């Protein structure tokens, strides 16, 4: 990177602040500090002005790819535009300055917000109750598997097998394994959906739960879902819905109606919270009927016009998180739901599916599409043809950066060779989609004429190719003078 780090900028004695002169003798202060807390050497801190700081970080921020600056078709992640008004609402002083230790009487407003959000999510997912505690989708999955364990413990059944399709997101088997269960993989058929025969072969008295994403990670709707639910239930197992792809189907089909017993929803994907920078998300978990008693405590209840927290739930799995979840994310969720209303929530899914199909239809001539002639809100292309010319999916993604597009998800799901998983989202215009399609066409022309320009990409970024393995295995994130 050609730019200097902030430690290399500025000059000795330059400051970005003014404080009144210290009027307590240093000796007196230092005598109050325990010896082991006193620094031996003066710290080497940057000595820069406020303007130096502003320019430095603004410049770094401008190098970033984000939804605000670029199309970000990162499949499965739903990197759509999140309305700014929801940020404003989450920052209202009544929300920001409240403390979770306040008594219930003084926080009726936020309790109403939690209560309403649960109710709306119930309606959208077709569930009977929700907890908003889990902090992300994976955390929701973990909560769900803990509920699964408890469910069978209470029934005195010893089941420890969790089934996942071979197209499943890595967090599904990881959450199941973390909760101490055995994971078994179900193969996909030639349509990219669950192979019913393989499912039947794996279902037995040991099956605790089948975890599914619908539409699945190939962007294909599982048409046999009602039949699958019947098969799993007949063997006494539970059916769990990974709601990461709800952006394709909300307002149109409800997992609860399709036979799912419990779900998580990645509200930071579908319900308007910026994500990708590691910031807080939320993975509310919804449950039907008998499973409701297992949800984490406290449960929020409405007694007449007052809201209260109920901790008296003998069959609960306990707490999943301090207090009541990532509250500001839930404010955005409710704001988004109320702004759109029933009709527009459905319209979001319709537009997401339309945009993805438009892109799929245009890119079909360039990429191999191993599964599905049409798709839901995303599709998975394969760069196998390009690989024959020595260019792989990762090369194409690096070259897309030069054209001003964030890369799609690559090499996932694992069942597609050289996978490029593309999710344009509903918030993108036709012009933006056409721009991306033109960029892919231009890259294809380069692959035909001069593949080296693609395999050595990116050419316009601050850094070129990173050694991906070394960066993951031996990350060096610290600058030392
Ligand atoms: C994103 C995603 C998850 C994990 O969700 P997080 O909120 O990132 O923890 C699980 N399954 C699928 C299909 C996903 O896309």
Image (tube, helix red, strand yellow):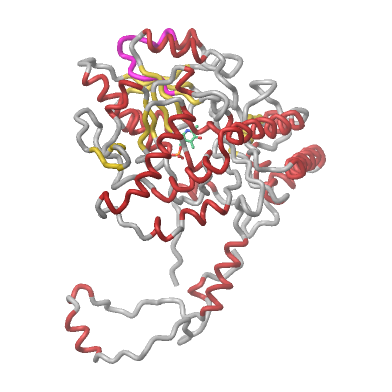
Work out whether residue 304 or residue 86 is closer to the camera in this orientation and state it: 304
Q: Say if 161 sits above or below 96 in the image.
A: above
- Left or right of residue 154: residue 7: right
The image shows residue 13 at horizontal and vertical percentages of: 45, 87
The image shows residue 307 at horizontal and vertical percentages of: 30, 42
The image quadrant that residue 57 belongs to is: bottom right
Q: Say if 212 sits above or below 45 in the image.
A: above
The image quadrant that residue 193 belongs to is: top right
Q: Quadrant of the N terminus?
A: bottom right
The image shows residue 225 at horizontal and vertical percentages of: 51, 15
**Residue 55 covered by magenta stretch:** no
Q: Residue at 21% across / 89% down in the picture? A: 27
- Left or right of residue 355: residue 298: left
Q: How many numbered marks, from 0 up?
A: 0
The image shows residue 211 at horizontal and vertical percentages of: 42, 23
Work out whether residue 238 or residue 309 is closer to the camera in this orientation and state it: 309
Work out whether residue 214 or residue 467 is closer to the camera in this orientation and state it: 214
**Residue 208 covered by magenta stretch:** yes
Range drawn in magenta: 200-211
Work out whether residue 416 or residue 23 is closer to the camera in this orientation and state it: 23
Q: Say if 11 sits above or below 335 in the image.
A: below
Q: Quadrant of the C terminus?
A: bottom left
Q: Residue at 35% across / 41% down in the picture? A: 133
């Amino acid at each position: 990177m050609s730019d200097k780090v902030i430690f290399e900028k500025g000059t000795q004695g330059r400051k970005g602040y003014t404080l009144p002169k210290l009027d307590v003798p240093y000796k007196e202060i230092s005598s109050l500090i325990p010896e082991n807390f006193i620094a031996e050497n003066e710290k080497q801190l940057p000595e820069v002005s406020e303007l130096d700081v502003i320019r430095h970080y603004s410049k770094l921020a401008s190098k970033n790819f984000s939804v605000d600056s670029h199309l970000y078709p990162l499949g499965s992640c739903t990197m759509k535009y999140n309305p700014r008004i929801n940020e404003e609402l989450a920052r209202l002083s009544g929300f920001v300055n409240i403390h979770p230790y306040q008594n219930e009487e003084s926080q009726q407003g936020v309790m109403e917000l939690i209560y309403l959000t649960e109710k709306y999510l119930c309606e959208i997912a077709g569930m009977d109750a929700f907890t908003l505690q889990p902090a992300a989708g994976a955390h929701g999955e973990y909560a769900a598997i803990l509920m699964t364990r408890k469910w069978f413990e209470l029934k005195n059944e010893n089941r420890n097998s969790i089934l996942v399709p071979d197209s499943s997101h890595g967090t599904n088997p990881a959450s199941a394994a973390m909760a101490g269960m055995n994971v078994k993989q179900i193969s996909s058929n030639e349509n990219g959906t669950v192979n019913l025969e393989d499912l039947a072969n794996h279902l037995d008295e040991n099956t605790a739960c089948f975890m599914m994403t619908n539409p699945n990670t190939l962007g294909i709707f599982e048409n046999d879902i009602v039949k699958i639910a019947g098969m799993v239930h007949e063997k006494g197992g539970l059916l769990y819905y990974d709601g990461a792809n709800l952006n394709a189907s909300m307002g149109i089909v409800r997992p609860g109606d399709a036979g799912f017993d419990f779900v998580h929803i990645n509200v930071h994907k579908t319900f308007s919270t910026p994500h990708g920078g590691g910031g807080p998300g939320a993975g509310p978990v919804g449950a039907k009927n008998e499973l409701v008693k297992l949800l984490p405590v406290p449960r929020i209840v409405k007694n007449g016009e007052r809201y209260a927290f109920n901790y008296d739930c003998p069959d609960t799995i306990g707490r999943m998180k301090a207090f009541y979840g990532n509250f500001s994310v839930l404010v955005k969720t409710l704001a988004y739901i109320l702004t759109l209303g029933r009709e527009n929530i459905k319209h979001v899914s319709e537009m997401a599916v339309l945009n993805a199909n438009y892109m799929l239809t245009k890119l079909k001539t360039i990429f191999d599409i191993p599964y599905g002639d049409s798709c839901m809100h995303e599709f998975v292309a394969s760069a196998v043809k390009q690989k024959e010319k020595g260019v792989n999916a990762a090369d194409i993604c690096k070259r897309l950066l030069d054209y001003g597009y964030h890369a799609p998800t690559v090499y996932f799901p694992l069942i597609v060779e050289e996978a490029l998983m593309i999710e344009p989202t509903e918030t993108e215009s036709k012009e933006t989609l056409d721009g991306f399609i033109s960029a892919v066409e231009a890259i294809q022309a380069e692959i035909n004429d001069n593949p080296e320009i693609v395999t050595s990409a990116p050419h316009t970024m601050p850094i070129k190719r990173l050694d991906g393995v070394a960066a993951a295995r031996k990350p060096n994130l610290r600058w030392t003078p």
